């Protein structure tokens, strides 16, 4: 009786042990299944790319969304492809050892830069180098110091910033192309450029103020020049036009006088004596408009030609005769002299 009971108890223990083992197996199976299911897919966001490595062979997956992989065989590494950046020369702790540089004219200066980059090849970004951002930072520091060392301190502080940034960017791009580490420089800018001490900074500010005053004076001078040159050109054009008009007027007048002289000469050539006397009388009339012109003929008669005598009283006639006699005698004498000369 006791043996049967003992055997029954052993069977019950075996059953309970088997049941417990089955439950543990189920739990393990469920856990393994969950792990397999959870490890068989992955998702990629819009700003990410993934690198799937199968037996050590990487492959880039660039399409965003849900993707599947083989658990325990394929591994997935996600890479951020958005624009990222870092500072060069400026630190949160206030140290600026990286910012101190020397210019071509042997001046010390603090220059802070900010570089922006993004991943272009996720496979190379993960496996071509241990830390591509650190490599980019070292390349940027080298290019920055090389470029700053070829410019004067005035150029770095004032007018040469754009050119310096452009040269540094191009130099970094060339070196990144040689290194081929899967990242690309987007932009690099000068955040701040200051002299090493306050006294030097004040001196540079005074120089900058003087340069701005010079630029202002030059701009005002150019503005005044641009205003005056059109006025001067307009005045010159007016003078030239007036001179041209005067020249044309004198030419026309000379041509008219020449034509008049030619016509007079033609008449003179036809009747030279008559024309000569007429010209003489006209000249005398212009010179002595109030003098009577009296012509004495060969027979001694006196003829008044110009001006015509008006009808006056006898007293006026007698006085005029007396006065005219003296004038006539004078003119007569001159006429005789002229006839003698002829």
Image: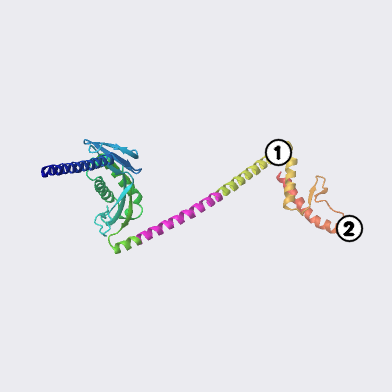
Q: Which segment is the magenta one?
A: 206-235
Residue 69 within the segment the image draws in magenta: no
Q: Residue at x 74, y 40 (%)?
A: 273
Position of residue 70 measured from the top left corner of the image (x, y, whole percent): 26, 36
Position of residue 162 measured from the top left corner of the image (x, y, whole percent): 35, 49
The answer to which quarter of the image holds residue 298 is: top right
Position of residue 143 measured from the top left corner of the image (x, y, whole percent): 27, 47
Q: Which mark is residue 232?
A: none
Q: Residue furthest bottom?
A: 199
Residue 211 within the segment the image draws in magenta: yes
Q: Residue furthest left?
A: 3
* Tag 1 and tag 2, C-beta contact below 8 Å: no
Pointer 2: what residue? Answer: 314
Nearer the observer, 147 or 89? 89
Pointer 1: what residue? Answer: 263
The answer to which quarter of the image holds residue 180 is: top left
Q: Answer few, some or many: residues within 10 Å of disc 1's Cα (few below 14, many 20 plus, some between 14 and 19).
A: few
Query: Is 34 on the left or on the right of 238, as rendered?
Result: left
Position of residue 97 measured from the top left corner of the image (x, y, whole percent): 24, 56
Nearer the observer, 47 or 30? 30
Predominant SS along the magenta part: helix
Nearer the observer, 218 or 30? 30
Image height of 25 relative to 307, above or below: above
Q: Is residue 215 visible?
A: yes
The answer to which quarter of the image holds residue 266 is: top right
Query: Is 238 on the left or on the right of 160, as rendered?
Result: right
Quadrant for the N terminus in the image: top left
Image height of 316 relative to 15, above or below: below
Measure how far apart labels 1 and 2 are at the Cα level.
Answer: 45 Å
Image height of 103 relative to 82, above or below: below
Identify the colour scheme used.
Answer: rainbow
Mark closer to the observer (1, 2): 1
């Amino acid at each position: 009786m006791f043996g049967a009971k003992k055997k029954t108890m052993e069977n019950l223990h075996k059953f309970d042990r088997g049941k417990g083992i089955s439950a543990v197996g189920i739990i393990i199976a469920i856990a393994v299944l969950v792990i397999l299911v959870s490890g068989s897919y992955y998702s990629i966001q819009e700003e990410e790319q993934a690198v799937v490595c199968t037996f050590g062979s990487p492959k880039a997956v660039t399409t965003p969304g849900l993707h599947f992989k083989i658990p325990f065989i394929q591994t997935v590494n996600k890479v951020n492809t958005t624009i990222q950046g870092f500072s060069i020369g400026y630190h949160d702790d206030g140290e600026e050892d990286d910012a101190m540089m020397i210019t071509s004219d042997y001046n010390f200066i603090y220059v802070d830069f900010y570089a922006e980059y993004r991943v272009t090849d996720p496979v190379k970004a993960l496996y071509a180098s241990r830390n591509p951002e650190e490599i980019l930072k070292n390349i940027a520091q080298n290019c920055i110091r090389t470029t700053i060392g070829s410019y004067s301190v005035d150029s770095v502080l004032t007018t040469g910033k754009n050119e310096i940034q452009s040269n540094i960017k191009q130099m970094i791009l060339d070196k990144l192309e040689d290194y081929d580490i899967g990242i690309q420089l987007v932009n690099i800018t000068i955040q701040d450029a200051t002299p090493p001490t306050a006294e030097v900074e004040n001196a540079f500010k005074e120089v900058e103020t003087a340069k701005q005053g010079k630029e202002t004076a030059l701009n005002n001078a150019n503005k005044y020049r641009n205003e005056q040159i059109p006025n001067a050109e307009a005045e010159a054009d007016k003078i030239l036009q007036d001179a041209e008009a005067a020249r044309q007027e004198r030419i026309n007048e000379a041509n008219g006088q020449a034509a008049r002289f030619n016509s007079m000469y033609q008449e003179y050539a036809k009747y030279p004596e008559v024309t000569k006397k007429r010209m003489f009388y006209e000249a005398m009339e212009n010179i002595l408009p109030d003098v009577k012109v009296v012509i004495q003929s060969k027979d001694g008669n006196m003829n008044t030609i110009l001006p015509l005598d008006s009808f006056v009283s006898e007293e006026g006639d007698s006085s005029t005769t007396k006065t005219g006699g003296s004038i006539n005698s004078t003119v007569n004498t001159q006429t005789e002299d002229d006839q003698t000369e002829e």
